[in-house]
Image: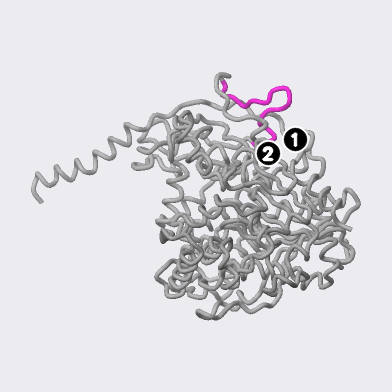
């Protein structure tokens, strides 16, 4: 090896190191001391003693027109939240709320809300049940390692199972499913999702008159328009026989940061998600031909059957679930989980996108997230909290970092764009472009990384109070967040990620659902079994919507006939997770009005 090559090689290795070292400048704004926590009006143990969550399954063979799905997919499963001391007889319930999760979410999205809603109704001497219906693709997930970890309170079992080939219960993880592994997903569309909700309702509540008196249907996010579709659906395909229509099989409709309507904004969002451009001919015939082309592409495999978001690969989503476990079990211990999982591309990309200070930091990415010291709570917070997470549909308002300096986060978009109205309106509905911060002390120098302060987490109820609502830096010059903008307990959000037999994040989201969603509003839809026939009738039944005030997008919410509550300071996930047990700090804006709606409109 000659001297010139050695010199070139040395420079090639040194230049990135010098650039990275030059970009690293620890320090910044140090958050003030957290306020004292607020006393709960009831403890989690009281809710656990009063409310049971159980998984119910109904046998209903999945479509087999394009391959044989796993046996687990032949069952509709839902989480049932009900009074623990009750008989379980539907006749004893004052109201039943049947909920559908949103985009990339499983039934566990409603884990906190379901328990609290049932408990708060009991405080009012009313019996309310919540049923969270799982979509069929969720049954394709291998939860062996996650369930073992939850049972043993040991995330190491899951890490070894999913990433290092360990055996659990005679089973080893075969890796995440790919498009070619699941041809049957081409048939897991809107018809199946809507009819599953109907099957749950009609099986559990066989008397139609009882359904009209006490069963309510709702959903979060995408579940809002899916609720409108359910109410508009004709389940026998004959619009002249109304007893089977969705709106005649429930007492009312509920939207949770998802409007109970279908708008052109929603159509455009669905169309943009598809890998092929819509045709220039948007007539009924042109769109019907386009729909046929898309469905055929799904069946042949020329179009992805799984919604293609690379950073949402199962191996990355599993990490988030394990972070939730550790945040619950050992909140103040230093997090080591990210050092224990292997450097897989999907995990690495997810962490880089979520923990980069700026574009140059993203490209060089040193120091990376494992160079910073976080408690288990803080590690979860920097990934999902609205002061760190840039993607609005994944944000919760849980508090703020403490015990170390932070700087403004200018990634994925510079915060300066917030001052440009056109650009702010264009991207601000989906990506946060201001109010984001990131830890900025991984050690005293680039060559001493991993030696910085241990960052902890100031929970939502430690961020200000009525006398002092702003959470500032120690100098008192910069407002980092406010009491109004923090509503969810990080411990509750952590539990939603994993507790019970289901989970929060959906590993396998079917592209067919989005294809059908795009097509359902066109007149040709019933020819393909998309029986959206009664949109003009759904305003005949009561409706209520709870919308997150921090990220409302009028193009997606649209005008509806619903009573609408806009929740100041709430983000997308907060509508499901805002703390209910500390009303002295702040009232939960969803649960009490929702119970009022259910009881006022049931008979």
Left or right, 411 with reference to 264: left
Indicate the position of residue 123 as horizontal and vertical percent values: 88, 48
The structure residue drawn at horizontal position 53% and vertical position 58%, both measured from the top left corner, is 318
Neighbourhood count class around disc 2 (C-alpha, 10 Å): few under 14, some 14–19, many 20 upward = many
The numbered mark at residue 320 is none
Q: Which residue is mark 1?
A: 586
Residue 473 magenta: yes
Of residues 395 and 190, the one drawn nearer to the viewer in this rendering: 190
Which image quarter: residue 234?
bottom right
The part of the chain drawn in magenta is 459-474
The numbered mark at residue 487 is 2
In the image, residue 149 above or below residue 382: below
The C terminus lies in which quarter of the figure? bottom right
What SS does tag 1 mark?
A: loop
Which color scheme is applied?
one colour
In the image, residue 305 above or below residue 113: below
Identify the mark nearer the N-term, 2 or 1: 2
From this viewpoint, which residue is outermost toward the right? 125
């Amino acid at each position: 090896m000659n001297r010139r090559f050695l010199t070139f090689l040395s420079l090639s290795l040194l230049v990135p190191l010098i650039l990275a070292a030059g970009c690293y400048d620890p320090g910044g704004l140090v958050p003030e001391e957290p306020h004292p926590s607020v006393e709960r009006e009831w403890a989690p143990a009281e809710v656990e003693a009063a409310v049971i969550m159980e998984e119910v399954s109904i046998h209903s063979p999945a479509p087999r027109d394009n391959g044989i799905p796993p046996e687990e997919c032949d069952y509709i499963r839902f989480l049932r939240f009900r009074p623990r001391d009750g008989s379980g007889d539907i006749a004893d319930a004052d109201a039943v709320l049947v909920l559908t999760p949103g985009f990339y979410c499983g039934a566990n999205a409603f884990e906190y809300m379901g328990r609290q809603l049932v408990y708060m109704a009991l405080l009012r001497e009313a019996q309310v049940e919540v049923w969270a219906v799982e979509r069929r693709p969720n049954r394709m997930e291998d939860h062996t390692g996650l369930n073992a970890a939850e049972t043993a309170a040991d995330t190491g079992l899951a890490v070894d199972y999913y990433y290092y080939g360990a055996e659990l219960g005679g089973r080893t993880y075969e890796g995440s499913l790919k498009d070619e592994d699941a041809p049957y997903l081409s048939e897991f569309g809107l018809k199946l999702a809507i009819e599953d909700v109907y099957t749950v309702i009609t099986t559990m509540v066989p008397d139609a008159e009882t359904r009209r008196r006490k069963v309510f249907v709702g959903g979060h996010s995408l579940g809002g328009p899916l609720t409108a579709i359910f109410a508009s659906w004709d389940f026998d395909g004959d619009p002249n026989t109304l007893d089977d229509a969705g709106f005649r099989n429930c007492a009312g409709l509920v939207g949770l940061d998802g409007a109970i309507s279908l708008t052109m904004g929603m159509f455009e969002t669905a169309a943009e998600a598809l890998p092929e451009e819509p045709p220039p001919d948007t007539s009924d015939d042109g769109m019907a031909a386009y729909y046929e082309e898309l469905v055929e592409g799904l069946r042949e495999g020329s179009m992805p059957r799984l919604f293609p978001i690379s950073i949402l690969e199962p191996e990355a989503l599993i990490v988030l679930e394990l972070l939730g476990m550790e945040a619950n079990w050992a909140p103040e211990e230093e997090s080591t989980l990210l050092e224990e999982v292997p450097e897989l591309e999907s995990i690495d990309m997810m962490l880089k996108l979520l923990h980069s200070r700026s574009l140059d930091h993203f490209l060089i990415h040193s120091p990376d997230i494992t160079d910073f010291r976080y408690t288990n709570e803080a590690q979860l917070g920097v990934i999902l909290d609205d002061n760190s997470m840039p993607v609005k549909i994944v944000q919760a308002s849980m508090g703020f970092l403490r015990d170390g300096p932070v700087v403004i986060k200018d990634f994925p978009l510079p915060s300066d764009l917030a001052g440009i109205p056109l650009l702010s309106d264009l991207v601000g509905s989906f990506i946060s472009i201001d109010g984001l911060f990131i830890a900025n002390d991984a050690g005293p120098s680039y060559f001493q990384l991993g030696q910085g302060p241990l960052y902890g987490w100031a929970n939502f109820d430690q961020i200000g109070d009525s006398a002092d609502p702003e959470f500032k830096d120690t100098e008192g010059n910069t407002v980092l967040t406010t009491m109004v903008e923090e509503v969810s307990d990080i411990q509750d959000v952590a539990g939603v990620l994993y507790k019970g037999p289901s989970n929060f994040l959906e590993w396998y989201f079917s592209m067919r659902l989005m294809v059908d969603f795009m097509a359902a509003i066109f007149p040709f839809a019933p020819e393909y079994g998309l029986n959206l026939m009664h949109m003009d009738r759904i305003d005949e039944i009561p409706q209520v919507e709870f919308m997150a005030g921090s990220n409302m997008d009028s193009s997606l919410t649209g005008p509806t006939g619903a009573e609408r509550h806009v929740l100041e300071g709430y983000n997308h996930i907060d509508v499901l997770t805002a703390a209910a047990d500390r009303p002295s700090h702040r009232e939960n804006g969803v649960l009490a009005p929702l119970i009022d709606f259910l009881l006022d409109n049931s008979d």
